[in-house]
Amino acid sequence: MKISSGRRASRLGDQIMRELANMLLEESQDPRLAFVTLSGVRMNSNLRVAEILFTLSGGEENLKDAEVALEKAKGFLRSGLGKRLKLRYLPELRFVHDRFLEDMIYGKPCPGNSPDNQE
């Protein structure tokens, strides 16, 4: 997926993230989605696909449950977006677990910054 860096894609991504976060907080009744936090949205170049980045506290089991719940709720969330946003084409939603914060918090070494390279 070629990611767009334009102003329109950025604004649309922010608006999608805001609306999805509100729907998850206020309208979702699935307990598996209780601790899901949206961390960003990436739009492709023609604004037809939105990758929603999410984080989750808990272990791998909670992550798998949340991924299943998000896939199940995808239609509900997309139809809610259609009612809230006035767009000609509503983007396809793809949920991707965002590991950036976990890598930063738990200190997974970056390539080239390993302790063996210290002098």
Image (spheres, rainbow, N blue to C red):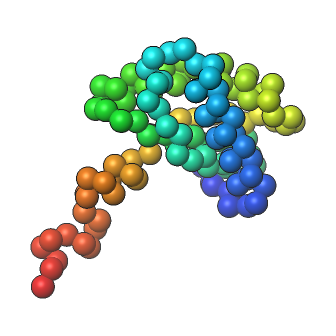
Q: Where is residue 51 shown, x and y percent of the image?
A: 59, 42
Q: Please indicate whether residue 107 sits to the left or right of residue 20 in the image.
A: left
The number of numbered discs placed on residues in the rendered structure image is 0
Q: Nearer the viewer, residue 41 or 32?
A: 32
Quarter of the image holding residue 88?
top right
Q: Quadrant of the C terminus?
A: bottom left
In the depicted view, which residue is nearer to us: 18 or 116? 18
Q: At 76% from the left edge and 60% from the top edge, which residue is drawn?
A: 7
Residue 70 percent across, percent down from the top left? 52, 25
- Above or below for 9 versus 31: below
**In the depicted structure, whether residue 75 falls above or below residue 108:** above
Residue 86: % across, % down: 86, 34
| 100 to 29, vertically: above or below | below
Which residue is pictured at 61% across the width and 49% down the height?
42
Q: Residue furthest bottom?
A: 119
Q: Residue, x 85% and y 36% (percent of image)? A: 87
In the image, taking residue 47 as reference, residue 26 lies left or right, namely left
- Determine the image quadrant of residue 118: bottom left
Q: Is residue 96 visible?
A: no
Instruction: Please report the residue visible at 77 percent of the width from the left and 34 percent of the height from the top.
Output: 90
The answer to whether residue 55 is left or right of residue 84 is left
